[in-house]
Image (cartoon, rainbow, N blue to C red):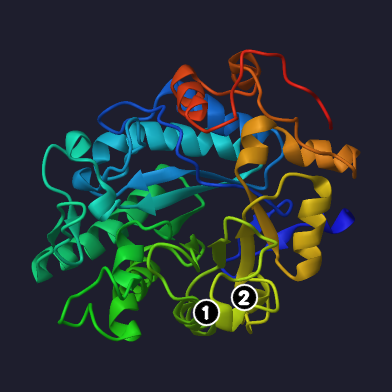
Amino acid sequence: MTDLFQPLSFKSGAVSKNRFVLAPMTNTQSHADGRLSDDEYHWLTMRAKGGFGITMTCASHVQANGKGFPGQLGCFSDDHLKGLSRLAAGIKAEQSLAVLQLHHAGMRSPEKEIGGQPVCPSDNEETGARALTMEEVEILKEDFIVAAERAEKAGFDGVEIHGAHGYILCQFLSPAINQRTDQYGGSLENRARIIFDIIDGIRERCSPAFLLGVRLSPERFDLRLGEIIEIAGRLMSEGNIDFLDMSLWDSFKEPAEDEFKGKSLLSYFTDLDRFGVRLGTAGKIYTAQDVNRCIEAGVDFVVLGRAAILHHDFPRQVLVNPEFKTVSLPVTREYLRSQGLGNAFVGYMAGWKGFVSDDPPTHTG
């Protein structure tokens, strides 16, 4: 257990006090224009206070037309600086590293949220999204980079580039969704180009001490595991990022593709040469034993979503109880409010099957 609470250093020089990272989670709590709300501030700073070494925000959209859900925190305008500065300061006051996740939903942007047609690497009949022009791709890259500069100005320790979960950078990676014929489509190198260009731009324009990470999904969303392994290896070997955050949905499963079965999905990434890049995993980590299994499997840190919703102080609970488990589901709305979720977030969680009930929760930890 002691390894979980040893400091974790990164190439940029940043140091996390432990191996627990708050996952970037949709919580629908901020204002319609992307400004920070008191509820979102409270939710995040409560996790920092609860012992997370890194506190990551929800996906924060870098363009107004990249909004993916109601109440999303924005980073596309200097109008957001005041709230972002307040948030970064509040997280860092608890000796937690503050990381802003940079995001654009692409074809997954609801028209009612963005007031127009969503965009995508290519025309997409299923969602009604239109293809980005070459000029718009260049603007998109620039807006990711400018958002990182804005985050640093606001006082964040770093940013994570959201290349997972079927959002726009993931859409570029997909050989099914991305049908471009220019330098951003076709080969894997071309489809991944936008991510590496954004990384290069952030490294050029933010300070060397600024923490930089990338989140990837290796499955779903029309992705190929072999290609994501290749991209992960390149991200590590080029050494321009500090950490790679693998969102696996289940950190203990085998791959879905038959040719990769026979060992864990996570092992395909822990087996890579890392060149000093830190590796984390997210997916079905609910107990102290789950955390230890992940660390023993070779990751440097764990990224917690549901466990952090249910226990704002999950790291501290694990520190005092090596057998700690999250409370059993469903839990009440009152219980979620006691853990720092505002009404909008509680309502969002009520949409998760079997998560919220009007009956008292059963404590098992």
Quadrant assignment, res 338: top right
Q: Which mark is residue 247?
A: none
| SS type, badge 2 | helix
Dot 2 surroundings within 10 Å: few (below 14), some, or many (20 or more)?
many
Quadrant containing the C terminus in the rendered view: top right
Please, is residue 335 above or below residue 305 in the view?
Answer: above
Instruction: Answer left or right for 334 relative to 42.
Output: right
Dot 1 surroundings within 10 Å: few (below 14), some, or many (20 or more)?
some
**Residue drawn at point x = 37 percent, y = 67 percent:** 222
Task: Please give the residue where the numbered disc 2 appears in the rendered image.
Answer: 269
**Residue drawn at point x = 50 percent, y = 42 percent:** 25
Q: Position of residue 114 (x, y in %)?
A: 18, 39
Q: Position of residue 23 (x, y in %)?
A: 56, 47
**Residue drawn at point x = 43 percent, y = 22 percent:** 344
Task: Please give the residue where the numbered disc 1 appears in the rendered image.
Answer: 229
| SS type, badge 1 | helix
